[in-house]
Image (spheres, coloured by chain):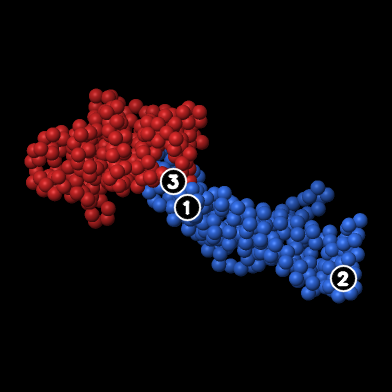
Amino acid sequence: MLMETVARWFLDLYETTGINLTIVYDAYDRQRFLSGLGMTIYLAVVCILISIAIGAVGAWAQGSPLRVVRGLVNGFVVIFRNTPPLVQIFFFYFGLGQILPRIEDADGMRVPILTNVQWAIVSLSLFAGAFNVEIFRSGLEAVPRTTTEAAQALGYTRLGVYRHVLLPLALRICLPALNNNLVNLLKTTTLAYAIAVPETLYVSKQIWTDSQNVPVMMIVLLIVYTLLVGILVFIMHRWEKALAIPGYGQGSGR
Amino acid sequence: MAALSPPEDFGWTPDQPLIRLVDVRKSFGAIEVLKGVSLDVAKGEAICIIGPSGSGKSTLIRCINALVPIDSGTIRVEGQEVNDPDLDKLALRRKVGMVFQQYNLFPHRTALDNIMMAPLHVLKQDRREVEARARALMAKVRLAGKEKAYPGELSGGQQQRVAIARALAMRPDVMLFDEVTAALDPETVKEVLLTIRELAEEGMTCILVTHEMGFAREVADHIYFTDAGVIVEHGPPASFFDDPRDPRTQAFLGQIL
């Protein structure tokens, strides 16, 4: 079988060179590593989607006529932008997680309301969302005031102007900046390691502890994240192209 | 989304002025831009507001659809008080179409979409009916075949005609034109003016701020001349242009004619 041939080749590689890729030839390590990779992708996709939603809603709330709402959004942005993401994760998991009441699960066990994976999603989404609010705001500010006026003159409500005119235009303007922040978010998912979320870095640590192949696993990690970010950037560029408008901004001259 | 509120009855009848401004005042900071402006526009009438830059012409028409709130005075559109804190701005703006100097089309949507958007999103009308109307409006402004073009692919004059069609798609009772040819090159000015003239001839109530004196003379039923925030002189085009009485009007017309 092909799988066995590949496994044998990597086992030979280890015996002849010392390059120990247990994640290829050892079924248990391979399974651990793939599930870690799956968790990283899961965290990244969910957090990207939630953080974009936070950015879009937050930037809209920043333009609210109510000072309280504007103040709340600005406070949120300051807190999550000005504190380290690892501290935020600890705050949610160890701080907030301890204070909140526990609930009974199906077996009658007293368990926390949110699991470590869920806390990681909450924490990372808010962290990246705070940056996304500012990124969307920069896009909104670049849309000419007169475009908004034209929509108002047609009878659009504030939400209607935002949904149908401002947001679609702002999104196109701020995509490069959004792109950067999402790349950062993907890499920041490794911090979930600190609360024992079994993502790529966490399972790699388990693997190198068991197999004593630290340098090899380090290189594997670098390659894996390079590829993951590469895929994200590719998708974002495709999105940018799909949104390009003939005769406008980067879409002009086509 | 909330259902559209039914049209309210403000006791207005078609024999009254469609739009009535009484002693309208507006300041931006320390600068008083409108110093007590009054005017009436009857249904089906086309009026032109002319005057030097900074005389408050644009501010004046932007007050009519509440894009600019006024400080004091009265603006009534079909009897509805615009200067009322409880004003339903959205209901007002459905009755008042506006065309801007810089066209202000939505650049991310095609010409046809630009026309269809507000009837679909704001009026919640049936898509097929809206599309048929939008295509008819494209033909009316002589842009049939450009339905799928994006604003960035159209010339200034073409964009402005799409903007006119976009405002008309809401079936307004009055159209406001804010220096709509000022950003166009002379070639394309003509096509836009032709479109507006046809509208006025069809009986659309039009309020135009313009620097096109020849056009104002041909199209307008009444000319208002503003200077420094007041209406200096007004009258039918013939007497206004041929026999201006106020020295400021004489000076202004002397400079540009």
Can you see residue A160?
no
What is the CA distance from the residue labelled 1 to the residue labelled 2? Answer: 53 Å
Which residue lies at the image location 50% right of the left edge and 45% below the top edge?
A: A163
Tell me, by letter, which chain the rendering colours red: B
Q: Chain of mark 1?
A: A
Tell me, by letter, which chain the rendering colours blue: A
**Which residue is under mark 1?**
A253
Which residue lies at the image location 80% right of the left edge and 62% below the top edge?
A: A33
Q: Amino acid at mark 3?
A: Glu
As rendered, which of B96 and A116 lies closer to the eye? B96
Residue density around tag 3, few if under 14, some if 14–19, many if 20 or more, within 10 Å: many
Dot 3: element: helix
Of the numbered discs in the image, which one, if any, rests on residue B14?
none
Answer whether labels 3 and 1 touch (C-beta < 8 Å): no
**Which residue is under mark 3?**
B153
In the rendered structure, the answer to whether residue A82 lies left or right of residue B24 reads right
Of the numbered discs in the image, which one, if any, rests on residue A13?
2
